[in-house]
Image (cartoon, grey):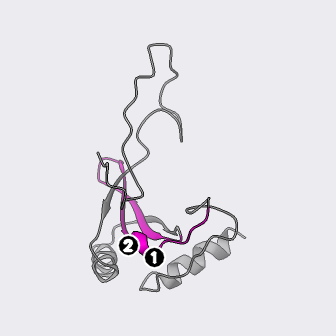
Amino acid sequence: MSADIEQSHEIALIEVGEEAPGVQHRQVGLNHMAWMMESLDDLKEFYCRLKEKNVPIGHISDHGISIGIYFSDPDGNGVEVSYELPRSQWNREENIFMGEGRMSGHFPGPWDEEMAATQAATR
């Protein structure tokens, strides 16, 4: 768990009670586990290793202050490997990750072509 103000992600453990519904997308349960890389170059190297090993990549998301590569482990668990800008470089807006007009495109790398294809397919 993180109590570090310099980090944007935390784990929250709460008791939901016996009457809580079962696991639901974006509700109770685990969406994915994430690991942060020390540098953007480290993330680029990791991406290239995934491609070399033919690991299917679910998607790549530029969140404005971070970029994440999402894939599944052999058991089907969601995994994110990402890089995040230092807090001093974060854009100061309320919806920092997914807000309308959020900053993006600050993480050029070997994934540019894959991200462009994904964006074109969702339009």
Picture quarter containing residue 83? bottom left
Residue type at numbered disc 1: Gln
**Residues at circles 1 and 2 in contact by the CB criterion of under 8 Å:** yes
Per the image, the residue denoted by label 2 is 86
Q: Position of residue 64 (x, y in %)?
A: 53, 71
Residue at figure coordinates x 54%, y 77% from the top left: 115
Q: Quadrant of residue 51?
A: bottom left
Rendered position, 103 above or below 94 = below
Residue 63 image position (x, y, % from top left): 52, 67
Q: Which mark is residue 53?
A: none
- What SS does tag 2 mark? loop
Please say if 24 is above or below 58: above
Left-right relation of 113 to 29: right
Magenta-highlighted residues? 64-93
Tag 2: residue type? Pro
Residue furthest to the top: 18
Q: Residues within 10 Å of mark 2 (few under 14, many from 20)?
A: few
